[in-house]
């Protein structure tokens, strides 16, 4: 077993070989799938728990509070306790609701980010699905979640839920456009949708630095639009607790509510992962052109730390938005998209093409 | 930046149906047990019908059996955010009936504490306003600053919210020796914090877009519905009792009556923020000039108002509070009626919110600064 | 045309948003300025102001003597009927006159609104407000208290 923190290819391959040597090929494949599945399940649970904790702490510090402090050291076990509570709660189903769709919605919402996270490259060689339409796959799959939200709102037999669901439908459909277009701006430079290729193309510097002004504009549009797409504040119209009590998940309780909650945080992670991969080089350390010495020092930090560091920074930014700004109104949200983000995005894409054609980027 | 043109009428609309939504009695943004029946067309509000009575405690009826000293403490429970002004209104009314000469010291202290109460009420309102619009952090900041005022109250009056510091004829006790220092410290502190309020909300583009041109109330409507306080003044209705019918020490301080003419949510918001500046100005003028003297005029143990009718109005943080006492020379009033600002302000909600969206209704309600126990009593 | 306005709108919009983020960011990096406290842990250092009205108590001195004459002025002053004075008539052995002595000073904490009127009305300053604020109990009947300690007597010379 050759475990190397800088390159997981050898490690993964040796596990594969070992499986193949012990089991017949078909069984080996299935065992491999199961191992990966278990890894992801554990990872997602831990991720959800820690993100909820982090969010609560970050929010508390923005608000000059301490946040959870009681369970565990500095409240670290608070979210575990919350989850245990949610598991033991009675899953209520509202009277007159469509039971099948009501239950289905919670699963759709959680399945979408599970699928998307498979394509996220964590470090060199630590990458489950690396095919040539990786970016396309993530954006496509992660928007399945909106069906879950729509179903949840529709089947709850609650007018607040319905309004929330309709809002989020309109919102996600429009912001999807901006997210994809802003990613496309960088794809113009990379020429590939494969995530590993995108990362590889940033070996001599990240696109946000190399891509000139259009890349920076694209990044800002991406971060705004993806915050909106994940239904987070200041774009949390679908929940809007002061208007719609809790929007689409008003009627959910117990573990099904936890699914909605978890899905929101995993979506947050995926957004940050995509942003980090496309604009900040994924797990690629900070390299500047051919400054060999500087690049060597940067290489010393393991890629996995680079990756999670970038993600943490982006998630922090998104949380910062949420805990500072008031919520937009639904029509303002759509105006922002169709009158501001989309036109700017299109112009930006054109600019980027010109930059790419003339080779003005670095 | 983002203007509202998205909902211009679409030709050949498919037929739609209006529907009802019950907003409240348990709803995060009604701030209490207020029930609003909304008639909606999609997200557009057609009609708002407030239904009251969920927190009715028959305070007016209870007053008919209580002595005048006891009535004062009941008014704490009406508009709990401007409890000192409510107390003051009753006390002034009783003093007017008894034709008592009130020591100057009492007048000045009452004015200072009234203005502190107004400040604390507006701070809380500011925090809640932000929270209603989705900026939860403002809530904590508002409470942070309010905490200093409640500390002052706790030290001097003995309670943080329902202080009951007034008694007919004066004050319950003299001010605490630390009172002046603490108040001055607070003013210096809050002068630094108030610009933060502007940075977080007032100038924020999302906030201005959500409040400008929303919940319009014309001057005529404000007058005919009796909308007073900052809400009425934001529609251009000059109704500040402190200016027009000065009581306590308001005749000797220099302050500006805040009047805006726009009549939208943003004007109401600005009116309150500006009022905080004015309140600080009033406190600054008085805090160093508290005259020496008694903290209470001599009154009999059992107060009986001479037969007749008495009316006294004060400016609370929400508007004009009127106390109307009919006395038949007994130890408790024959009838006592409160003209509460919240009730009249709420009555104008329908014309303000009509045609706006649900999200706008929340903003409009926040800028009206409703306190439900004040409406229901 | 509007293009200039369009761009300046965006510029000022973004600027106002960044100003807002500066405020929250300012507090994020200053954990020293945190205002909330950890309540049961800071019990030792938590001192209420001496005027704070927590509950009504009858003052007893070290000889288990109090100053209450049983005049019921506080009972009458209370708007909520939270004080009940149950008094006895006792014949004074020396003078032979019958005097009023409190048997029980019953105080219903659950009905008290902490208005301070009873304290103001007491002619002998026998009662005062204590600063204790932790009143939660598991049984409501525990909130009805008898304030005079068993065996306590009225101080001599009060009447
Ligand atoms: S404080 Fe007020 S309510 Fe409480 S016992 Fe005294 S008079 Fe009654
Ligand atoms: S406490 Fe004071 S007012 Fe009450 S009965 Fe005793 S002496 Fe009278």
Image (cartoon, coloured by chain):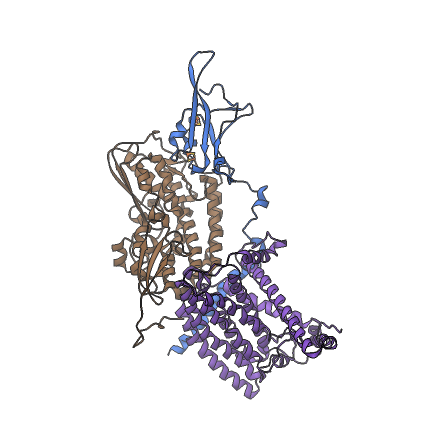
Chain colours: A purple, B brown, C blue
Q: Is residue A354 above or below residue A326?
A: below
Q: Please say whether residue A301 is visible from this viewpoint.
A: yes
Location of residue A355 in the rendering, given as x and y in whole percent from the top left corner: 54, 85
Residue C54: give x, y in percent of width and height: 48, 38
Which of C25/B294 is in front?
A: C25
| Residue sitting nearer the eye, A297 or B139 | B139
- Quadrant where the image shows the C terminus of chain A: bottom right
Residue at 47% across, 52% down:
B143
Please give left or right for residue A17 compared with residue B272 in the image: right
Task: Where is residue A358? Give x, y as percent.
Answer: 55, 88
x%, y% of residue A184?
Answer: 53, 81
Whether residue B70 sits left or right of residue C44 in the image: it is left
The quarter of the displayed image where residue A79 is located:
bottom right
> Which quadrant does ligand 2 occupy?
top left
Tell me the quarter of the image containing the N terminus of chain A.
bottom right
Taking B307 as reference, is A319 left or right?
Answer: right
Q: Residue at x 66, y 69 (%)?
A: A305
Q: Nearer the viewer, residue C130 or B177?
A: C130
Can residue B205 be seen at all in this image of the molecule?
A: no
Quarter location, residue A7: bottom right
């Amino acid at each position: 077993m050759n475990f190397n923190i800088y390159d997981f290819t050898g490690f993964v391959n040796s596990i594969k070989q070992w499986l193949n040597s012990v089991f017949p090929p078909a069984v080996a494949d299935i065992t491999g799938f199961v191992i990966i599945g278990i890894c992801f399940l554990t990872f997602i649970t831990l991720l959800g728990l820690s993100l909820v904790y982090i969010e609560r702490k970050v929010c508390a510090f923005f608000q000059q509070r301490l946040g959870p402090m009681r369970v565990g050291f500095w409240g670290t076990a608070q979210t575990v306790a919350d989850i245990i509570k949610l598991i033991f709660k009675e899953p209520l189903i509202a009277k007159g609701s469509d039971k099948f769709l009501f239950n289905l919605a919670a699963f759709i919402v959680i399945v979408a980010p599970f699928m998307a996270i498979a394509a996220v490259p964590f470090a060199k060689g630590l990458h489950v699905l690396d095919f040539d339409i990786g970016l396309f796959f993530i954006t496509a799959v992660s928007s399945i979640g909106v069906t879950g939200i729509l179903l949840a709102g529709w089947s709850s037999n609650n007018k607040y839920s319905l309004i929330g669901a309709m809002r989020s439908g309109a919102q996600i459909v429009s912001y999807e456009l901006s997210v994809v277009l802003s990613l496309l701006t960088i794809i113009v430079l990379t020429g590939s949708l494969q995530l590993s290729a995108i990362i590889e193309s940033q070996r001599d510097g990240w696109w946000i630095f190399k891509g000139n002004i259009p890349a920076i504009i694209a990044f800002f549009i991406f971060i705004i639009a993806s915050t909106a797409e994940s239904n987070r504040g200041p774009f949390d119209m679908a929940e809007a607790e002061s208007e719609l009590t809790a929007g689409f998940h008003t009627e959910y309780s117990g573990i099904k509510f936890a699914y909605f909650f978890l899905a929101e945080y995993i979506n947050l992670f995926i957004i940050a992962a995509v942003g980090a991969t496309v604009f900040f080089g994924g797990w690629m350390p900070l390299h500047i052109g051919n400054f060999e010495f500087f690049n060597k020092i940067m290489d010393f930090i393991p890629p996995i730390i680079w990756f999670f560091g970038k993600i943490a920074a982006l998630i922090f930014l998104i949380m910062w938005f949420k805990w500072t700004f008031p919520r937009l109104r639904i029509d303002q949200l759509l105006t922002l998209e169709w009158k501001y983000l989309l036109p700017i995005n299109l112009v930006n894409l054109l600019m980027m093409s010109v930059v790419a054609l003339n080779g003005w980027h670095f | 930046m983002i203007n509202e043109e998205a909902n211009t009428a679409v030709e050949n609309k498919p037929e739609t149906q209006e529907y009802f939504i019950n907003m409240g009695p348990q709803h995060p943004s009604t701030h209490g047990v207020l029930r609003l029946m909304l008639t909606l067309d999609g997200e557009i509000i057609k009609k708002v019908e407030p239904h009251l009575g969920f927190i009715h405690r028959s305070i007016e009826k209870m007053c008919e059996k209580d002595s005048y000293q006891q009535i004062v403490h009941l008014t704490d429970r009406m508009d709990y955010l401007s409890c000192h002004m409510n107390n003051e209104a009753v006390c002034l009314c009783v003093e007017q009936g008894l034709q008592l000469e009130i020591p100057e010291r009492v007048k000045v202290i009452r004015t200072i504490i009234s203005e502190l109460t107004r400040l604390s009420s507006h701070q809380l309102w500011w925090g809640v306003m932000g929270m209603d619009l989705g900026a939860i952090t403002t809530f904590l900041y508002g409470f942070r600053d309010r905490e200093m005022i409640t500390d002052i109250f706790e030290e001097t009056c003995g309670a943080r919210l329902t202080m009951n510091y007034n008694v007919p004829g004066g004050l319950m006790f003299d001010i605490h020796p630390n009172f002046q220092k603490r108040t001055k410290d607070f003013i210096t502190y809050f002068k630094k914090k108030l610009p933060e309020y502007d940075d977080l909300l007032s100038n924020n583009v999302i906030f201005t877009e959500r409040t400008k041109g929303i919940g319009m109330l014309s001057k005529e409507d404000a007058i005919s519905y009796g909308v007073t306080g900052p809400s009425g003044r934001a529609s251009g209705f000059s109704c500040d009792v402190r200016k027009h019918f000065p009581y306590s020490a308001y005749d000797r301080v220099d302050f500006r009556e805040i009047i805006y003419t726009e009549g939208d949510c943003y004007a109401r918001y600005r009116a309150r923020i500006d009022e905080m500046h004015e309140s600080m100005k009033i406190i600054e003028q008085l805090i160093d000039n508290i005259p020496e003297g008694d903290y209470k005029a001599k009154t009999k143990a059992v107060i009986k108002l001479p037969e007749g009718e008495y009316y006294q109005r004060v400016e609370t943080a929400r508007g004009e509070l009127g106390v109307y006492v009919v006395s038949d020379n007994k130890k408790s009033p024959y009838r006592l009626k409160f003209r509460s600002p919240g009730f009249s302000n709420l009555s104008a909600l329908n014309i303000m919110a009509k045609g706006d969206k649900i999200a706008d209704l929340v903003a409009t309600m926040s800028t009206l600064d409703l306190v439900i126990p004040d409406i229901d009593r | 045309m509007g293009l200039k306005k369009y761009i300046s709108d965006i510029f000022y919009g973004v600027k106002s948003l960044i100003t807002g983020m500066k405020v929250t960011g300012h507090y994020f990096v200053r954990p020293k300025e945190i205002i909330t406290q950890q309540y049961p842990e800071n019990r030792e250092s938590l001192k209420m102001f001496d005027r704070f009205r927590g509950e009504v108590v009858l003052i007893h001195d070290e000889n288990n003597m109090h100053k209450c004459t049983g005049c019921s002025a506080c009972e009458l002053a209370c708007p909520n009927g939270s004080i009940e004075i149950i008094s006895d008539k006792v014949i004074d052995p020396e003078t032979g006159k019958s005097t009023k002595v409190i048997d029980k000073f019953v105080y219903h904490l659950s009905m008290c609104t902490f208005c301070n009127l009873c304290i103001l009305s007491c002619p002998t300053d026998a009662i005062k407000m204590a600063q204790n604020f932790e009143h939660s109990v598991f049984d409501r009947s525990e909130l009805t208290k008898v304030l005079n300690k068993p065996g306590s007597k009225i101080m001599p010379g009060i009447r």
